Structure formats: C-alpha cells, structure tokens
Amino acid sequence: IMVDVNRQKLIAEFKDLLAPCSRDLISRGKIECVVWFDQDDDSNECAWIARIVSTVFDESKDVTSMLCSFPGFGDASNVYWLPCIWRSQWLVYQPNTEILNDAKYATVWHKENFDASQSLLAQTKEYLSDLSDDDDAGDDGDDAY
C-alpha cells in the first residue's frame, strides 16, 4: 500500500491547528459535533464530522467513548460508539469552522460527510463565537480609527 506522505503531513498540520475537545463542552451540550480522524472505504485517512448523539460517556479502563453518528455516511439512524479519549489523550477535536473551511484543508475531509454536516457546523460556530465574545467585554465595536 502506497502512503501519500504529503497527505499525511497535511492531516498532521490540520490536527495541530485544532483544539482537543473537553468533557465540559460535550457533557454540557455546548457543541453539536466533533472532528474525528479515521479511514474511508479506500483506506485513506480522512477528517470526519461526528454528530454527538448522547452526552453520556461510556468509560472503560483505557478508552472513553460516546455515541455519535456521521452525517452523509450510511443510514442516518446508524450510531456508533466513538472512542474519544484513549487513556488521557483526546482523540476528537473541537470543530473550529474557520480552520475547517480553510481551502488548504479541503482535501482532508470525507466529502459527503463534510457537505452533510454544514448545518451542524453553523450551530457550533454560533456557540464558539458566543464563547469568544466573553473576551470582548466592554467593547461596543464602535472603535474610531
């Protein structure tokens, strides 16, 4: 099997830009979806958007999982136990739409999944921008230049 080194580098760079998820974001229902990396049917590593189905974690000795589905992939009713934490390392990432929509990374996505996830991403973007608004407390946006 031929490994596409440039694709692997691009995916590694993409992962480095994304922030790992947190139990708080998920369990409090603050985000609707997460970014997950796995192979597609052709064995190419891809970025996927996983819709969070339940915010209850399934804990085992080494792996913590949660129920997710993958828009645009298979039957919409299919749900999967997605491993999100291995020992103490997060395997899923926060969906930062600014990074996700960067044309440089358009090829890392499972296309049908990404296209079918746009409304989920819009909801999450709204929430994440609400979070960042806290940084602007006292700024009325009317700065004169």
Image (tube, helix red, strand yellow):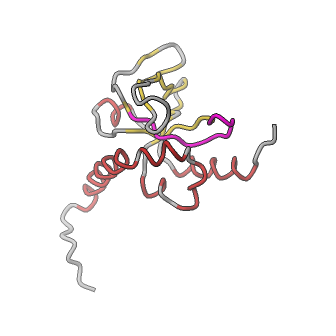
| Residue 90 percent across, percent down from the top left | 51, 33
| Residue 8 percent across, percent down from the top left | 69, 47
Quadrant of the rendered structure where residue 103 is? bottom right
Quadrant of the rendered structure where residue 45 is? top right
Q: Is residue 129 above or below residue 83?
A: below
Q: Nearer the viewer, residue 109 or 9?
A: 109
Residue 111, magenta (yes or no): no
Q: Residue furthest front?
A: 75
Q: Is residue 128 above or below residue 51?
A: below
- 129 to the left or right of 4: left
Q: Nearer the viewer, residue 5 or 22?
A: 5
Q: Residue furthest right?
A: 1
Residue at 56 percent across and 55 percent down: it is 106
Query: Which quadrant does the N terminus fall into?
Result: top right
- 31 to the left or right of 96: left
Query: Which quadrant does the C terminus fall into?
Result: bottom left
Residue at 46 percent across and 39 percent down: it is 72
Q: Residue furthest top?
A: 61
Residue 43, magenta (yes or no): yes
| Residue 36 percent across, percent down from the top left | 52, 37
Magenta residues, start to end: 40-51
